[in-house]
Image: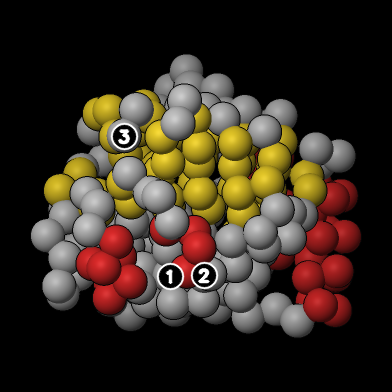
Amino acid sequence: MKVTKFTHSCVRLEKDGRVLVIDPGVWSEHTALRGADAVLVTHGHGDHVDVLRVAGAGVPVYAPAGAELPGLSPTFLSGGETRDVAGFAVTAVGVAHAAVHKGLPSLPHLGYLVDDLYHPGDSVRPPGDSVLPPGVDVATLLVPMQASWLKTSEAMDLIRAVDPALAIGIHEGQLNDRGIHAVNGWLGQASPRYRYVPPGEAVR
């Protein structure tokens, strides 16, 4: 499977001539959706879904049950549900959006296991807390780098808890070059298998 990183939380997955895009938000490049067969949305925040652009793509959209996405008619998924999406095996993982501050309202949110790649959306879990269905091995983990709801130590803990063959930094849209360099240094200490893939570049 080819994984192309776009700005912030957006990734494009390609396999056997099919294309699945996760979280094409307002900060991601429009080319992420070129030739897409389907879109996965972790939640309704604009940095994760540009509803106008996704509507214009005219492809099937999958989103958490109850998500409000004006102008879109998604197929709703619930945590634990598994289905074929554009030729990819997708398991919806029922994890809540991480809290910015206690007492603030949350919204429908899912992580996605796509084949053996895991996109957590806006979520991390502490060590010892399961982030995936039991018995699932993750070859590639997409790990958030920066957010109002995130501490760098939590991202490091996520890498160590999942222990993937490859961890790729995402959710960096509000970091400048100095910030990206600093966070990469910390996440690299969490695992020698961590790497930052600049927007537009791909790994297999």
Horizontally, residue 48 falls left or right of residue 192, namely left
Residue 86's tag is 3
Q: Position of residue 120 (x, y in %)?
A: 48, 50
Q: Tell me the CA gap for discs 3 and 2.
A: 21 Å
Q: Amino acid at mark 3?
A: Ala
**Image quarter of the C terminus:** top right
Q: Tell me the CA gap for discs 1 and 3.
A: 20 Å
Q: Position of residue 112 (x, y in %)?
A: 40, 42
Q: Amino acid at mark 2?
A: Ser
What residue appears at the point 36 percent right and 56 percent down from the top-left corner? 42
Neighbor class of circle 1 (other Cα within 10 Å; few <14, some 14-19, many 20+) is many
Q: Position of residue 46 (x, y in %)?
A: 37, 76
Identify the residue position indicated by label 2 in the image: 28
Horizontally, residue 193 falls left or right of residue 79, namely right
Q: Tell me the CA gap for discs 1 and 2.
A: 5 Å
Is mark 1 in CB contact (under 8 Å) with mark 2?
yes
Does residue 64 appear in the picture of this structure?
A: no
Identify the residue position indicated by label 1 in the image: 25
